[in-house]
Image: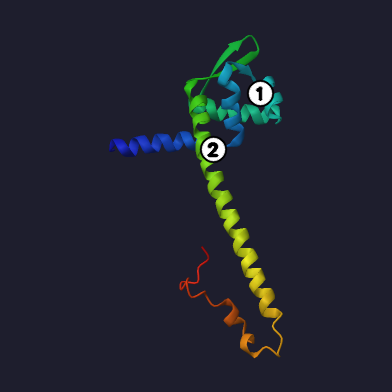
Amino acid sequence: MPYRTVVTKELGGLLGILSHPCRLQIVEELREGERDVNSLQESLGISHSGVSQHLTTLRAHQVVLERREGRHVFYRLRQPELAAWLVEGLAFIENDRESLERISSAVQAARQVWLARKIEAVSVSPEQPEAAHPQEIIEPAKDNPSGRDQ
């Protein structure tokens, strides 16, 4: 198997394991060191069995390691750098949010323009023959032949 296929398969598997919000929270909680299931349950606000299931998945994929002390089991990150890597990944979310805000602003502007045109088309009275057809109101401006809003 070519090296690129092996690497992308492994990275895809890791990202798949980390794709659940609770598992991301567990990784973040383990950033500072070991935690037991009860303390993770308090932090995450989910059931004991839910925390255990997520830890089982993380352990099976070697994201976390466990240490037993009597009846207590403590978990830690196998590679603590993973938590730092996730923090660095927040930049992608911030950039995406800016893009979404730009898109949202554009949608709002388009909605205002389109609704204003609809109101103009509806308010045209029969005594105004020069604007009797709504398509005349919606025609693109001469300086914008494509008709696309900018």
Q: Where does residue 5 sit, x and y in percent of width and height?
A: 33, 39
Please identify the quarter of the rendering in which residue 32 is found: top right
Is 77 situated above or below 11? Answer: above
Describe residue 11's horizontal placement relative to residue 36 as left or right.
left
Residue at the limit of the structure toward the front, as seen here: 143
**Is residue 39 rendered to the left or right of residue 33?**
right
User: Which element carries disc 2, helix, strand or loop?
Assistant: loop
Tell me which label, 2 or 1, sits earlier in the chain: 2
The residue under label 2 is 19
The spot of residue 45 in percent (x, y) is 71, 30
Q: Position of residue 117 (x, y in %)?
A: 64, 73
Amino acid residing under circle 2: Ser
Numbered badge on residue 40: 1
Residue appearing at x 62%, y 17% in the figure: 35
Q: Residues within 10 Å of mark 1 (few under 14, many from 20)?
A: many
Quadrant for residue 10, please give it. Answer: top left
